[in-house]
Image (tube, grey):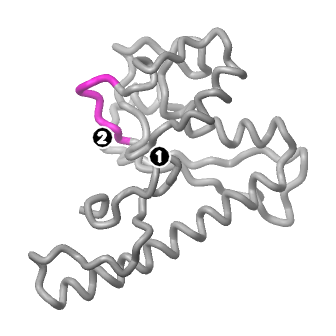
């Protein structure tokens, strides 16, 4: 429902929220629901803007290699391509990546530059049919983008899933 309400601004839009907060909600809703949808759009836009500022802050505080790693990390979790870290045979992989995540051309070039042996073709960066995208989100935790971040800090990333949708073996493979 949210994707239909908020839309996508562009392929580079990380969170997929609409630009125009003043666009009317769907007309098949009651007036009370339309007010709620409009308020949700405003809050979603604020959430999106906050996350974009946070990501910009994180990137600005990291060294070059760390910037690249931070930018590639979601793609490395999302993709299962031979030659990339974390590759496992497709028959052993239980999920199809991160929900609503798309790889733009800049990120694809970054991956190709850093993993030249990876088979990063347009076909390989698409999730196979029948594979559900069960990773709901990635969340950065800890010192990242705070005053405590140093060049020696690591990245603490949570992979958010519905645990009940994974077998113990699939959870182990994800880790």
Q: Is residue 5 above or below residue 154?
A: below
Q: Nearer the viewer, mark 1 or mark 2?
A: 1
Q: Secondary structure at mark 2?
A: helix
Residues 156 and 119: in front is 119
Q: Secondary structure at mark 1?
A: loop
| Residue span colored magenta | 128-134
Please tell me which residue is depicted at 89% across the width and 44% down the height of the picture: 152
Q: Residues within 10 Å of mark 1 (few under 14, many from 20)?
A: few
Query: Residue 62 bears which disc, if any?
Result: none
| Residues at circles 1 and 2 in contact by the CB criterion of under 8 Å | no
Please provide percent x and percent y for residue 139. Answer: 57, 54
Q: Is residue 25 left or right of residue 116?
A: left
The answer to whether residue 165 is magenta is no
Please tell me which residue is depicted at 43% across the width and 72% down the height of the picture: 44
Q: Which residue is mark 2?
A: 165
Please tell me which residue is depicted at 29% across the width and 29% down the height of the picture: 131
């Amino acid at each position: 429902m949210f994707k239909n309400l908020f839309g996508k601004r562009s392929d580079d839009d990380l969170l997929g929220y609409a630009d125009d907060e003043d666009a009317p909600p769907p007309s098949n809703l009651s007036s009370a629901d339309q007010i709620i949808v409009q308020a949700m759009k405003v809050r979603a836009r604020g959430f999106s803007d906050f996350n974009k500022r946070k990501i910009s802050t994180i990137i600005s505080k990291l060294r070059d290699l760390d910037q690249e790693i931070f930018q590639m990390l979601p793609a490395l979790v999302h993709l299962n391509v031979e030659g990339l870290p974390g590759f496992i045979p497709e028959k052993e992989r239980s999920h199809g990546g991160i929900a609503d995540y798309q790889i733009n051309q800049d990120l694809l070039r970054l991956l190709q530059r850093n993993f030249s042996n990876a088979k990063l073709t347009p076909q390989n960066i698409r999730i196979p049919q029948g594979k559900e995208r069960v990773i709901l989100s990635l969340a950065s935790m800890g010192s990242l983008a705070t005053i405590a971040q140093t060049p020696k800090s690591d990245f603490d990333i949570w992979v958010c899933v519905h645990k009940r949708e994974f077998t113990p073996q699939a959870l182990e493979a994800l880790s």
